[in-house]
Protein backbone atom coordinates (compact mmCIF):
# COMPACT_ATOMS: atom_id res chain seq x y z
CA UNK A 1 0.00 0.00 0.00
CA UNK A 2 2.89 2.37 0.72
CA UNK A 3 3.70 2.57 -2.99
CA UNK A 4 0.29 4.16 -3.55
CA UNK A 5 0.78 6.82 -0.87
CA UNK A 6 1.00 9.71 -3.36
CA UNK A 7 -2.28 8.76 -4.99
CA UNK A 8 -3.96 8.17 -1.62
CA UNK A 9 -2.75 11.56 -0.35
CA UNK A 10 -3.78 13.41 -3.50
CA UNK A 11 -7.29 11.95 -3.64
CA UNK A 12 -7.72 12.05 0.13
CA UNK A 13 -6.76 15.70 0.36
CA UNK A 14 -9.06 16.68 -2.51
CA UNK A 15 -12.00 14.95 -0.82
CA UNK A 16 -11.14 16.61 2.50
CA UNK A 17 -10.73 20.02 0.88
CA UNK A 18 -14.17 19.77 -0.72
CA UNK A 19 -15.85 18.57 2.47
CA UNK A 20 -14.07 21.21 4.57
CA UNK A 21 -14.99 23.98 2.14
CA UNK A 22 -18.65 22.96 1.95
CA UNK A 23 -19.24 21.89 5.56
CA UNK A 24 -19.81 25.44 6.79
CA UNK A 25 -22.20 26.18 3.92
CA UNK A 26 -24.09 22.96 4.66
CA UNK A 27 -24.13 23.97 8.34
CA UNK A 28 -22.38 20.73 9.30
CA UNK A 29 -19.06 22.15 10.56
CA UNK A 30 -17.89 18.79 11.90
CA UNK A 31 -18.07 17.00 8.53
CA UNK A 32 -14.89 18.36 6.92
CA UNK A 33 -12.69 18.05 10.01
CA UNK A 34 -13.99 14.52 10.60
CA UNK A 35 -13.13 13.54 7.01
CA UNK A 36 -9.69 15.13 7.46
CA UNK A 37 -9.13 13.19 10.68
CA UNK A 38 -10.01 9.92 8.93
CA UNK A 39 -7.72 10.85 6.03
CA UNK A 40 -4.83 11.71 8.38
CA UNK A 41 -5.22 8.53 10.43
CA UNK A 42 -5.32 6.51 7.20
CA UNK A 43 -2.18 8.23 5.96
CA UNK A 44 -0.37 7.73 9.26
CA UNK A 45 -1.38 4.05 9.27
CA UNK A 46 0.09 3.57 5.81
CA UNK A 47 3.40 5.22 6.76
CA UNK A 48 3.47 3.39 10.11
CA UNK A 49 2.95 6.57 12.13
CA UNK A 50 6.15 8.21 10.87
CA UNK A 51 7.13 10.74 13.54
CA UNK A 52 8.29 13.24 10.90
CA UNK A 53 4.81 13.26 9.36
CA UNK A 54 3.18 13.72 12.75
CA UNK A 55 5.44 16.71 13.52
CA UNK A 56 4.74 18.33 10.14
CA UNK A 57 0.99 17.89 10.54
CA UNK A 58 1.05 19.54 13.98
CA UNK A 59 3.28 22.38 12.78
CA UNK A 60 0.97 22.98 9.80
CA UNK A 61 -2.03 23.02 12.14
CA UNK A 62 -0.32 25.58 14.36
CA UNK A 63 0.84 27.69 11.40
CA UNK A 64 -2.61 27.56 9.81
CA UNK A 65 -4.33 28.48 13.05
CA UNK A 66 -2.03 31.47 13.58
CA UNK A 67 -2.16 32.75 9.99
CA UNK A 68 -5.87 32.28 9.43
CA UNK A 69 -6.72 33.77 12.82
CA UNK A 70 -4.57 36.78 11.91
CA UNK A 71 -6.27 37.04 8.51
CA UNK A 72 -9.60 37.05 10.32
CA UNK A 73 -8.49 39.43 13.09
CA UNK A 74 -7.16 42.02 10.65
CA UNK A 75 -10.27 41.76 8.51
CA UNK A 76 -8.65 40.33 5.39
CA UNK A 77 -10.84 37.23 5.41
CA UNK A 78 -14.14 36.18 6.91
CA UNK A 79 -15.09 32.56 7.57
CA UNK A 80 -18.64 31.30 7.69
CA UNK A 81 -19.25 29.95 11.15
CA UNK A 82 -16.30 31.69 12.82
CA UNK A 83 -16.33 34.32 15.54
CA UNK A 84 -12.82 35.41 16.55
CA UNK A 85 -10.45 32.66 15.42
CA UNK A 86 -9.92 30.40 12.44
CA UNK A 87 -12.57 27.69 12.21
CA UNK A 88 -11.69 24.04 12.60
CA UNK A 89 -12.50 23.27 8.96
CA UNK A 90 -9.79 25.64 7.64
CA UNK A 91 -7.27 24.21 10.13
CA UNK A 92 -8.17 20.71 8.90
CA UNK A 93 -7.30 21.89 5.37
CA UNK A 94 -3.83 22.93 6.57
CA UNK A 95 -3.29 19.49 8.09
CA UNK A 96 -4.33 17.74 4.88
CA UNK A 97 -2.24 20.05 2.72
CA UNK A 98 0.86 19.37 4.81
CA UNK A 99 0.56 15.67 4.00
CA UNK A 100 0.51 16.39 0.27
CA UNK A 101 3.74 18.34 0.66
CA UNK A 102 5.46 15.35 2.24
CA UNK A 103 4.71 12.80 -0.48
CA UNK A 104 2.58 14.01 -3.40
CA UNK A 105 4.53 17.25 -3.90
CA UNK A 106 7.90 15.87 -2.77
CA UNK A 107 9.45 16.95 -6.09
CA UNK A 108 9.30 20.52 -4.74
CA UNK A 109 11.82 19.59 -2.05
CA UNK A 110 14.87 21.90 -2.46
CA UNK A 111 13.00 23.89 -5.12
CA UNK A 112 12.00 26.72 -2.84
CA UNK A 113 11.41 29.25 -5.62
CA UNK A 114 8.87 26.93 -7.26
CA UNK A 115 7.36 26.17 -3.87
CA UNK A 116 7.05 29.88 -3.22
CA UNK A 117 5.34 30.35 -6.59
CA UNK A 118 2.94 27.54 -5.72
CA UNK A 119 2.03 29.34 -2.51
CA UNK A 120 1.91 32.75 -4.16
CA UNK A 121 -0.63 31.60 -6.74
CA UNK A 122 -2.25 28.53 -5.21
CA UNK A 123 -2.96 30.02 -1.78
CA UNK A 124 -5.14 32.91 -2.97
CA UNK A 125 -6.79 30.70 -5.61
CA UNK A 126 -7.82 28.25 -2.91
CA UNK A 127 -9.36 31.07 -0.87
CA UNK A 128 -11.08 32.39 -3.99
CA UNK A 129 -12.62 28.96 -4.48
CA UNK A 130 -13.92 29.25 -0.92
CA UNK A 131 -15.46 32.60 -1.84
CA UNK A 132 -17.25 30.95 -4.75
CA UNK A 133 -18.55 28.22 -2.47
CA UNK A 134 -19.71 30.71 0.14
CA UNK A 135 -17.53 29.54 3.02
CA UNK A 136 -15.14 32.51 2.87
CA UNK A 137 -15.40 36.24 2.23
CA UNK A 138 -12.46 38.32 1.05
CA UNK A 139 -12.71 41.98 1.98
CA UNK A 140 -10.64 43.60 -0.80
CA UNK A 141 -7.80 43.17 -3.27
CA UNK A 142 -5.20 43.90 -0.59
CA UNK A 143 -6.38 40.75 1.14
CA UNK A 144 -5.32 38.69 -1.87
CA UNK A 145 -1.86 40.24 -1.73
CA UNK A 146 -1.55 39.41 1.97
CA UNK A 147 -2.73 35.83 1.33
CA UNK A 148 -0.26 35.47 -1.54
CA UNK A 149 2.68 36.69 0.54
CA UNK A 150 1.77 34.50 3.52
CA UNK A 151 1.42 31.41 1.37
CA UNK A 152 4.58 32.24 -0.62
CA UNK A 153 6.47 31.92 2.67
CA UNK A 154 4.44 29.10 4.23
CA UNK A 155 4.91 26.48 1.52
CA UNK A 156 8.73 26.73 1.42
CA UNK A 157 8.80 26.89 5.22
CA UNK A 158 6.87 23.64 5.53
CA UNK A 159 9.06 22.01 2.87
CA UNK A 160 12.23 23.08 4.66
CA UNK A 161 10.87 21.62 7.91
CA UNK A 162 10.05 18.37 6.11
CA UNK A 163 13.65 18.25 4.88
CA UNK A 164 15.02 19.08 8.32
CA UNK A 165 12.95 16.42 10.08
CA UNK A 166 13.78 13.88 7.36
CA UNK A 167 17.50 14.44 7.87
CA UNK A 168 17.26 14.41 11.68
CA UNK A 169 15.17 11.35 12.45
Image (tube, grey):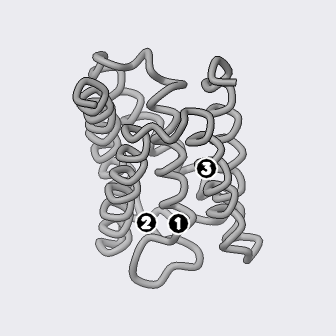
Element assignment for label 3: helix
Sequence-first disc among 2 and 1:
2
Q: Which residue in the structure is indicated by mark 3?
A: 41
Residue 132: x and y in percent read: 66, 55
Sequence-first disc among 1 and 3:
3
Sequence-first disc among 3 and 2:
3
Q: Residue at x 40, y 76 (%)?
A: 85
Relative to 151, residue 79 above or below: below
Which residue occupies the foreground of this view, 105 or 151? Answer: 105
Which dot marks residue 137?
1
Element assignment for label 1: strand
Residue 131: x and y in percent read: 59, 58
Q: Residue at x 59, y 48 (%)?
A: 40
Q: Which residue in the structure is indicated by mark 2?
A: 77
Residue 10 appears left or right of 47: right
Residue 71: x and y in percent read: 34, 65
Residue 167 appears left or right of 52: left
Relative to 149, residue 163 above or below: above
| Residue that sits furthest to the bottom in the current view | 83
Instruction: Locate the N terminus and report the quarter of the image it occupies.
Output: top right
**Number of the front mark, 1 or 3:** 3
Q: Residues within 10 Å of mark 3 (few under 14, many from 20)?
A: few
Which residue occupies the foreground of this view, 162 or 116? Answer: 162
Residue 136 appears left or right of 123: right
Q: Residues within 10 Å of mark 2 (few under 14, many from 20)?
A: many
Q: Residue at x 26, y 37 (%)?
A: 157
Quarter holding residue 66: bottom left
Amino acid sequence: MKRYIKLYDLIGFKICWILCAFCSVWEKPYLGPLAALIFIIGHLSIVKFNFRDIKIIFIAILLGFILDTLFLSFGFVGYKGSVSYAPLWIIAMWAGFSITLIYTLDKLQNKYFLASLLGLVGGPLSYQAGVGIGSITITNNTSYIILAIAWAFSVPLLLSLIKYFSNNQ
